[in-house]
Amino acid sequence: MTTPLTGSAQSQRTATVACQFCSTLNRVNVARLDQKPKCAECGRPILLDRPLHVSDATFERVTTDTEIPVVVDFYADWCGPCKMMAPILDELAQERQGEVLVVKLNTDENQATAQRLNIRGIPTLAVYRQGREVVRQTGAVPRSEVNAMLARAAGA
């Protein structure tokens, strides 16, 4: 079980996310998630308690401008092992919101990013810190391995 970050260390931490309704990029202070952030463009809620979708257009900005670790799930809708990973990533996003940002990139719809990053198999999970990939795992893994990836990323 993880405890949330407290005090000034978390108060300065932000995440850049695309609104799931209008795709506008927003910067969210993760210390203020309890104040229910809203999109600056459409006013709808920004929910970080679930994986958010990124695209070729938003991937770089989200991974670079987010000050907390970003777990990226490279997946495809038709992929059975990807579907097995979905509930694990849903739980991770809910339990560690404000500490970790969980995003999904559909490799069928966003081939440029997948190709640039040399994603050869799916699902592939990667953890980014300050725009730099620090850990990668290809294939479906149990929650304990996802937690181990995050621990390795913290030490990187």
Image: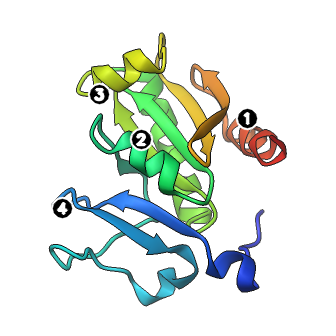
Badge 2 is on which residue? 60
- Mark 4: which amino acid? Phe
Q: Of tags 3 and 2, which is closer to the observer?
A: 2
Check disc 1: other Cα within 10 Å, few if <14, some if 14-19, many if 20+. Answer: few
Q: Which of marks 3 and 4 is in front?
A: 4
Q: Cα distance, mark 3 to mark 2?
A: 22 Å
- Dot 1 falls on a residue whose secondary structure is helix
Between 21 and 13, the one lying in front of the other is 13
Among the two numbered marks 2 and 1 on one chain, the one whose residue lies closer to the N terminus: 2
Image quarter where the N terminus lies is: bottom right
Answer left or right for 62 relative to 10: left
Query: 10 or 48: which is nearer to us?
Result: 10
* Label 2 close to label 1 by CB (< 8 Å): no
Tell which circle, 1 or 4, labels the residue nearer the N-terminal end: 4
The residue to which callout 1 is attached is 145
The x, y position of residue 20, in whole percent, is 25, 58
SS state under label 4: loop
